[in-house]
Amino acid sequence: MTTPQHPEDFLSALRLRSAREDGVFWVDDQRLGVFEPEAARRVSATNWHRFVLQDRLVDMVRRRPSPEMRWSRIRSAWLTQLHALATAEQHGLLIERMAHVLDARTGQDTETDLTMLMQDVALRSLLPVALGGLSGAEAEVVRRDLEMKLSRLVSATPGGVPHHLRHVAVQIRAGLVVRRVLRQRARGRRGREPDLADPFVDLLPELGMDRALDVVTTVLTAIGGPPGTAAASVLYEFVRHPGWQRRLEAELGAVDPVEFRTAPTRAAPVTYRFVKEVLRMWSPPLLLVRRSTFGFDLGGTRLEPGQWYLLSPHLIHRDERVWQRPDEFDPDRFLPGAPHGPADRTCYVPFGWAPKKCVGANIAVVQLMALCHLLCTRYRLTVADPEAVTMALRFAPVPENFHGRLALR
């Protein structure tokens, strides 16, 4: 039996081959690696064209087509709702939810697992954005489902956490919660909420409950892993770079709170550069697997319809052909005109490629900047030996041996 290759070794091998083979090469007999920035952008954009949801279950049973529902229409509904949520008031509520989770972990005698704490902060603060108005019991079921899925992703051994029947039971219960919420909102028995599930209440007759459930589950899955690993990566770089800690503390200690909640990227440009560099270094997930629906000529390589290909923001962000000193953590590379900055916009893709770019990119940046603000103004984080913390590469970068204490300032 062949021993599976460790993810870090696999990524290192891909990086070496990408440098030798100009970013486009067959990883094996079935998967093409597309790690050259422009090729990745073109393939991703074209394959998104006319991407539609599967037919409704009732129509598949009756062997008839469903009303076509493009994913572009779903994304448009999400983006409209997220625009409505991009207010100082909503940002303030997000920060309050983050602080509530962190407050409960301050002043403890024992050290806290900071990686898992960041998962808890991200999940609990973003859940009302994805699916709001839940009772305590409903929210607990949804959180347990997402936490169980996360445990498989962050396991030190790929596939090392068995998929017990109780996991399946929790997943089914979480699905029933989503169904109940959508149905009750549609019937006026539950109030409408300014969340990412609500636009699909009005589309239920066209979508069908099974497709609406898939859409909402997509949002819930998106908040159940990458945001927490990104937040843990922010803490990882924060404790490893005291100089940047001081720069962030100076900026965030002086910024007007209302101005920060209204437009954090404009109010705190140094912090914004810090977050952008964290996302360049440690953008989750590390690899994306896609199936092509079109044919592409990529230099001397042909990708045929139906063939699989790999994308990787992580490898593009570490490509020495487009970034100078890519393994060095330096947020000032994002200063205007910095010579070691990105060669062009296609080289910085922590949230993927347009038009399929992650719809939650803006709120993700707000959350990470809010975390920096809390660390610099409300809490004091102590990690005994920051150099002992290591970054493991699994489905996403995951800090290991990352323990510390939080105290109120």
Image (cartoon, rainbow, N blue to C red):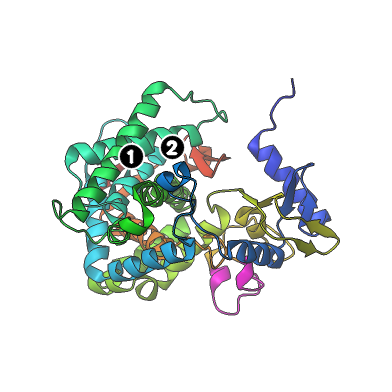
The circle on residue 175 is 1
- Marks counted in the figure total 2
**313 with respect to 102 (left or right):** right
Magenta stretch: residue 150 in it?
A: no
The circle on residue 150 is 2
Q: Nearer the viewer, residue 183 or 247?
A: 183
Q: Quadrant of the N terminus?
A: top right
Question: What amino acid is found at the position of numbered circle 1 in the picture?
Answer: Gly
Question: What amino acid is found at the position of numbered circle 2 in the picture?
Answer: Leu
| First-in-chain label (1 vs 2) | 2
Q: Secondary structure at mark 2?
A: helix
Q: Nearer the viewer, residue 148 or 246?
A: 148
Which residue is painted at 24% across and 41% down in the image? 139
Q: Is residue 224 above or below residue 268?
A: above
Magenta stretch: residue 336 in it?
A: yes
Q: Is residue 255 visible to the viewer in this orientation of the structure?
A: no
